[in-house]
Amino acid sequence: MDLDAYVAERRGEWNRLEALTRRRKLRPDEADELVLLYQRAATHLSVVRSRSPDPVLVAGLSRLVLAARATITGTRKFSWTPVARFFTTTLPGELYRTRWWWITVGVLFMVAATAMVQYVAGHPEVAGVFMSDTEMNDLVSKDFVSYYSEYQAQNFAARVWTNNAWLTAQCLASGVLIVPVFYLLVQNLLNLGVIGGVMVGSGAGDTFLTYLAPHGFLELTCVFVGAGVGLRIGWAWIAPGPHRTRAQALGERARSGMLVALGLALALFVSGLLEAYLTPSPLPAAVRIAIGVLVWLGFLAYALLLGHFAHHRQGSADLDEDLGEAAVPTR
């Protein structure tokens, strides 16, 4: 192909296209002309690339085609509407749809934790398997309370947030394998049961509840949500349901899990602030606990009440039908 002749023949169209892309407003006939010239320039770029890939010409035509496409499609401006929709509809709807998973996990965990605290409190030798007598005495006399004021509040909040977010992320990510979720929950159950049992058995149960309740309700609920949603993801490839493959079911549940993960990151940030600023504060114990319970109830109302309306209003937060895979009958 004679590149010079090809360029000379079409240079006028390219110049006209460039002039149209620079205009702020176009008449209807100019808009039609812009679309036509854009289509031709895209064809010209394809021809040049395949037959005579001159780098300078390819770069110039690519820039022209991209500029014309941007003029035709327009630039998307930032809008708060999708952000508002996420927090008012998408996130609460997903929390509501997964409610039975994380509520079940939470109830079973708390029943097991309560039973373990009572058992360890009544059998001190069990705690001795995990801690020495000196460690138990230090825990009751100073370590449990001083833990919440050992660091500066802002540093402690960041540390707690990242630790809890990492634990919740592990529950979500490992849910596809199911077993690791139970391993993580058992680890936390042992930690809570042993420490709580030592505190209660030593007569410091009120201190244990006073320093755990202000942040613990919300913090543990977030962990339960992460574990429940993770197990829901894992169950998708075991029982995908009718009219979809295991890959489709797993993809749908994983996308749902990523939405919940974003919301949990924010909820755990609030929990971290409560643990760093409210739990060790000089406020009366009843006030601290009341604030923590109110925040927790607010989260439950957001997930269950607002989530109920969001679920029935939106239906599903998964990909639109035209963007997803076609459903096929499966056995």
Image (tube, rainbow, N blue to C red):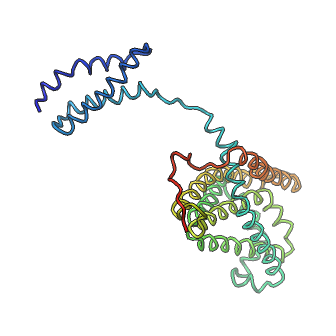
Q: Residue at 33% of width from left, 16% of height from top?
A: 19
| Looking at the image, residue 92 lies above or below residue 132 | above
Q: Where is the N terminus found, in terms of image quarters?
A: top left
Q: Residue at 76% of width from left, 67% of height from top?
A: 142
Give the percent coordinates (x, y) of residue 176. Answer: 56, 67
Q: Residue at 50% of width from left, 30% of height from top?
A: 76
Quick one: 59 or 14, which is closer to the camera? 14
Task: Tell me the quarter of the picture where residue 275 sits.
Answer: bottom right
Residue furthest front in the image: 329
Q: Residue at 35% of width from left, 17% of height from top?
A: 20
| Looking at the image, residue 276 lies above or below residue 117 | above
Q: Where is the C terminus found, in terms of image quarters?
A: bottom right
Give the percent coordinates (x, y) of residue 326. Answer: 51, 53
Residue furthest bottom in the image: 125
| Looking at the image, residue 140 lies above or below residue 35 | below
Total number of numbered labels?
Answer: 0
Give the percent coordinates (x, y) of residue 194. Answer: 74, 76
> With 69 as the anchor, is 160 left or right in this view?
right
Quick one: 329 or 239, which is closer to the camera? 329
Give the percent coordinates (x, y) of residue 169. Answer: 59, 60
Quick one: 14 or 95, which is closer to the camera? 14
Quick one: 140 or 307, which is closer to the camera? 307
Residue furthest left in the image: 2
